[in-house]
Image: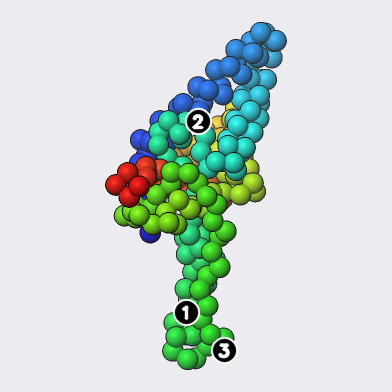
Amino acid sequence: MAAPLAEPGQRLLARVVDTLIVGVPVVLAIRELASGRAVDVAAPVAVAGCMLVYEAVQLALWGRTLGKRFAGIEVVVAPPDEQPGGAVAEDAEPAAAGGTGALPASPPVPVSPVPVPGFVPAGVSGNADAGVAARPDVLRSVLRAAVYSLPIAARPIPVLGLLAGVFWVVNAGVLFEGTRRQAAHDRLAGTLVVKRARPDSSAL
């Protein structure tokens, strides 16, 4: 059973915390090393690079950044039927069930589960497998972090900076399209952001 999706407010809180953790120290360091126009050019590039590494490493290792830990949410791999191409497996099932398909129906291959301490899917208690969730692998983590972070580096460039601003508006807007609350970087990486439930103490 799936964990409940993270609320938009939780995701915003996590982003604010992560931005403060990474952005403030990086900008202060750049101001010490450069001055004038150089700061305006170097700071966005440095923040983008540090944010990418900061997020990608933590997502690949734990499925959460410090900001997401603070907000009580985490990133997991979307189930196969919620990823691009998942509809193909669903379309093939009716034909096989009716005996018209050439091959028997087979369940979709699940993503290898990775133990995540404290993760309890919604509605599950006392289940030995309740602590298993699929966190994003390195490729998904880097892709997700890059799609969000790299537009920051484009801010000093007039046209690209404007396009980056438009992208962030669209990225936030698509969060409210559909029922899975996936921003653009989630859709491209095939991930979901869910609430990180605490283990049921009564089951211990």
What is the x, y in percent for residue 160? 61, 33
Is label 3 in a helix, a strand or a loop?
Answer: loop
Q: Is residue 126 visible?
A: yes
The residue carrying mark 3 is 102
Residue type at mark 2: give it: Leu
The quadrant of the image that shows the N terminus is bottom left
The amino acid at mark 1 is Glu
Q: Position of residue 182 (x, y in %)?
A: 45, 49
User: Which sits earlier in the primary sequence, circle 2 or circle 1?
Assistant: 2
- Density class for disc 1 (Cα within 10 Å; few <14, some 14-19, many ≥20) is some
Residue 90 point in image, percent of width and height? 47, 73
| Vertical position of residue 10 compared to residue 89: above or below | above
What is the spatial separation of the Cα atoms under label 3 and label 2, in whole angstroms? 49 Å
Mark sitting on residue 93: 1
Judge by depth and name the residue closer to the eye, 159 or 60.
60
> In the rendered image, which residue does mark 2 sit on?
66
Determine the residue positioned at 44% across, 89% down: 98
Q: On the rendered structure, is 35 left or right of 70?
A: right
Q: Are marks 2 and 1 in contact (CB under 8 Å)?
A: no
Q: Residue at x 53, y 85 (%)?
A: 104
Q: Crowdedness of circle 3 by 10 Å Cα count: few (<14), some, many (20+)?
A: few
Seen at 60% across and 43% down, the residue is 60
**Looking at the image, which is closer to me, 174 or 115?**
115
Q: Are marks 3 and 1 in contact (CB under 8 Å)?
A: no
Name the element at disc 1: helix
